[in-house]
Amino acid sequence: QLRIVESGGGWVESGGSLKLSCTGVGNTLDRYPIGWIRQVPGKEREVVSCISMSGRNKDYPDSVRGRFAVTRESANAVSLHMNSLKPEDTAVYHCAAGTPWFNQAKCLLLNQYDNWGPGIQVNVSS
């Protein structure tokens, strides 16, 4: 049974960069498509990146496209590189594994993920 753990959050000034990392316990992440999902209190959760098992297919919503980049660093590590950060990027960021019926074409939809890590806080000051 896969358990997901995130690391790397914290405080950064507007315009700065931060790297989040995701690893698996009990199984390796290369067996799953992976999404990064953020949650702001009072707002809808948003999938901010997704990456296929091979790492060749990725997608991003317009809100972060060109600023965020997701990579598979190894068989059991997925990173989210966040650049040109804005105060509105402040959120709890979760790494999540895709469902058994995962559809890459729909990877920016929340219902494609069913195993989430506890999340890590990212704060961007203005």
Image (cartoon, rainbow, N blue to C red):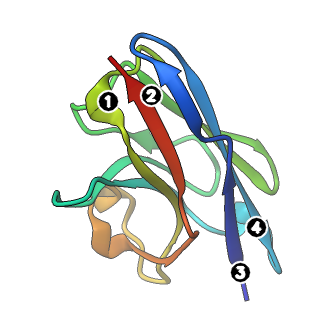
Instruction: Check if mark 3's residue and mark 4's residue have beta carbons within 8 Å.
Output: yes
Q: Is residue 29 visible in the rendered structure shown here?
A: yes
Residue at x 36%, y 72% (from the top left corner): 112
Residue toward you, 58 or 121: 121
Instruction: Check if mark 2's residue and mark 3's residue have beta carbons within 8 Å.
Output: no
Quadrant for the N terminus in the image? bottom right
Amino acid residing under circle 2 = Phe
- Between the residue at mark 4 and the residue at mark 2, the CA separation in whole angstroms equals 21 Å
Q: Which percent across, then down, holds residue 31?
A: 70, 69
Q: Is residue 81 visible in the rendered structure shown here?
A: no
Instruction: Please name the residue that numbered disc 3 is placed on.
Output: 2
Q: How many labels does the image show?
A: 4
Would you call the spot at circle 3 few (<14 residues within 10 Å), some (14-19), or many (20 or more)?
Answer: some
Amino acid residing under circle 4 = Gly
- Between the residue at mark 3 and the residue at mark 4, the CA separation in whole angstroms equals 6 Å
Instruction: Give the structural element (helix, strand or loop) at label 4.
Output: strand
Amino acid residing under circle 1 = Val
Instruction: Please name the residue that numbered disc 2 is placed on.
Output: 68
Q: Which percent across, then down, holds residue 33?
A: 55, 62
Residue at x 44%, y 35% (from the top left corner): 123
- Between the residue at mark 2 and the residue at mark 1, the CA separation in whole angstroms equals 6 Å
- On screen, residue 3 above or below 71: below
Q: Which percent across, then down, holds residue 82?
A: 50, 27
Label 4 vs 2, first from the N-terminus: 4
Q: Which percent across, then down, holds residue 23?
A: 75, 59
Checking the image for residue 24, the label placed there is 4
Instruction: Check if mark 3's residue and mark 1's residue have beta carbons within 8 Å.
Output: no
Residue toward you, 13 or 63: 13
Label 2 vs 3, first from the N-terminus: 3
Residue at x 43%, y 53% (from the top left corner): 92
Instruction: Please name the residue that numbered disc 1 is placed on.
Output: 64
